Image (spheres, rainbow, N blue to C red):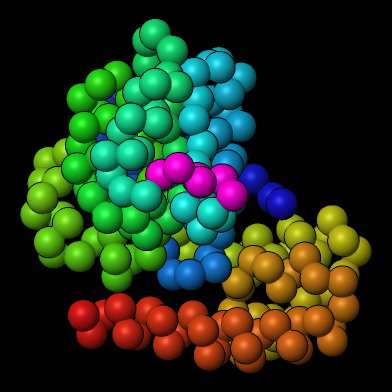
Amino acid sequence: MILREKYIVPIRDFYKSDLIKIITGIRRCGKSVILKQVMDEISVKSSNLIYLNFENAVNVPDIKNGNDLIDYVLKKKKRGLCYVFLDEVQTIDGWQLACKTLRLNQCSVFITGSNSKLLSSEFTKELSGRYVSFRIRPFVYKEILKIAKEKRKKVPISDYLIWGGFPNRFYMKNQEAQDLYLPNSICKCIIRAESEGCKK
């Protein structure tokens, strides 16, 4: 996966900030990858790092709500600043209070989620002045050309204009896999889910 410097650079300034770092964007645009690239940078300097993916039940078996999350992190963190990465944390109840509590207990908190959920008026009001958000977008054509060069493939701009730059498809083995992935994953699931979220 290519390093998306244009997103990493502005986030760098907030690595040690007590503001909650919110990484948002449409589904499947690469938010989790950005989160892990930030983790890779920070892990070089700190072993006090916690990562939880709330879309993977195996990864968070004992965390059912915000209070469980607070208990888990505070028991696991070492002395000093702890970097906490929460992927799709909005899937558990009470995550807002958990994030606010952790930032007040020597934790630099990074979270990911979709625009419609994380940037709802209710949430932004509750965290007013306590967060900074970074919007991630699918690949631009320049990034696609970089991947194509690495894989020795050609990606016509007409292909990009029709299907866009959702990252997963550029790492699939063949065109047949892409043809199956795009209509089902992008057109049906992502666009529908985002539009439904905007109605709420």
Q: Which residue is drawn at 61% across and 32% down?
A: 40
Query: Which span is picked out in magenta?
Result: 58-63
Q: Which of 136 and 111 is in front in this view?
A: 111
Residue 153 painted magenta = no
Residue 66 can be seen in this image: yes
Residue 62 painted magenta = yes
Q: Which residue is drawn at 9% across and 54% down?
A: 125
Drawn side of residue 176 relative to residue 179, left or right: right
Q: Nearer the viewer, residue 66 or 187?
A: 66
Q: Is residue 151 above or below residue 37?
A: below
Q: Residue 107 at x, y = what percent?
A: 33, 25
Q: In this view, does 189 lie above or below 122?
A: below
Q: In this view, does 19 lie above or below 155?
A: above
Q: State which quadrant residue 115 falls in.
A: bottom left
Drawn side of residue 194 relative to residue 160, left or right: left
Quarter the C terminus occupies: bottom left
Q: Which residue is drawn at 41% across and 44% down?
A: 63
Q: Which residue lies furthest to the top in this view?
A: 79
Residue 13 can be seen in this image: no
Q: Residue 31 at x, y = what percent?
A: 50, 55
Q: Residue at x 77, y 65 (%)?
A: 171
- Dominant secondary structure of the magenta stretch? loop
